[in-house]
Image (tube, rainbow, N blue to C red):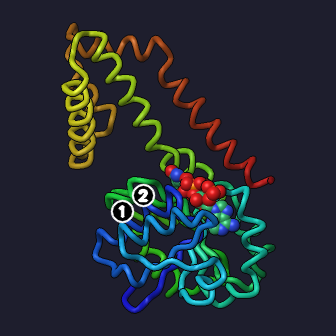
Amino acid sequence: MKNLCIGFIGAGNMANSLINGLLGQGIEPESIVASDIDNSKTERLRRESGIRTASNQALVDEVDVIVLAVKPQILARLCQDISLHSRRKLVISVAAGITLAKMESWLGSDTAIIRCMPNTPASVGKGVSGMIANANTSKSQRALATDLLTAVGIAVWVDNEREIDAVTAISGSGPAYYFLFLEAMQEAAREIGLPDDTAKILCLQTAIGACELANSSCDSFGELRREVTSPGGTTEQAIMQFESGGLRELVQKAITAACDRSKQLAKG
Ligand SMILES: NC(=O)c1ccc[n+]([C@@H]2O[C@H](COP(=O)([O-])OP(=O)(O)OC[C@H]3O[C@@H](n4cnc5c(N)ncnc54)[C@H](OP(=O)(O)O)[C@@H]3O)[C@@H](O)[C@H]2O)c1
């Protein structure tokens, strides 16, 4: 990625996560440019991280890789605005639900486009992104996108664009599911008598520890769970409540709803 200039259009949550992750990996701030309709957001980024800011048009003219990080509903208009200038550049869209075909129709059918679904833990180098490229994208552009996204976590290429809706539902939206569970656990800890700060440490470190253990183990998630669940013990009581309360069905329902929403966004 040396000598490469990366531009982010839309300087909101996702762009901030990616930019902070890239800077954390030692990418030079001068090689990152951001634009946003709201100048205060780009100004803050410039002040806090030293990256450069520009208008959408100036950014498109200057950079080698354009990352489209605006809300899906904004993308059609934005792509039409930049279409004449973005050709021969690699365009990476992180917008949920917007297909490669749609972006080709807005940007020009000869544009190299990668549809990517990252997530916000990219800001601490722990993101995961699912990606798919259109036929105009060269091998070296795919390698470049892999480098860009592996700088902020793990990048996975999918073979079929339909899988991106599932990636969106699992890992794109996924951090929020874990935050919700942490919130619920912290509330429960309060109910059973723990002070908030102690509850926070216990909930957080338990999540980190469980994930690191799972990551370093060959056992399935189910086997790891059974290892903690002694018959007649305390964990078994909690697991029985989760199972009889329909946790698995609820998770299935929630993730299907997120996946359906991603498909719906594609229809416009
Ligand atoms: N957040 C996540 O966890 C996550 C995960 C994966 C993928 N994504 C995708 O990432 C994209 C951005 O999401 P986000 O959460 O970062 O949204 P966000 O925080 O709202 O950021 C989008 C930014 O784009 C700005 N904007 C709107 N129109 C613009 C234009 N024409 N030119 C330049 N900037 C413009 C918005 O300004 P205003 O607020 O003033 O409109 C806002 O600052 C979405 O497509 C989403 O699907 C997000």
Is residue 95 something that shows in the picture? no
- Say if 147 sits above or below 175 in the image: below
Q: In which quarter of the image is residue 124?
A: bottom left
The picture places residue 59, in percent across and down from the top left corner, at 58, 82
Q: Would you call the spot at circle 2 few (<14 residues within 10 Å), some (14-19), or many (20 or more)? A: many
Q: Quadrant of residue 213?
A: top left
The picture places residue 71, in percent across and down from the top left corner, at 65, 57
Residue assigned mark 1: 153
Amino acid under disc 1: Gly
Residue pictured at 47% horizontal, 60% vertical: 129
The picture places residue 153, in percent across and down from the top left corner, at 36, 62
Distance from the alpha carbon under mark 2 to that under mark 1 = 5 Å
At mark 1, the secondary structure is strand
Give yes or no for contact between labels 2 and 1 (Cβ–Cβ under 8 Å). yes
The picture places residue 31, in percent across and down from the top left corner, at 42, 84
Front-most of residues 145 and 40: 40
Residue assigned mark 2: 128
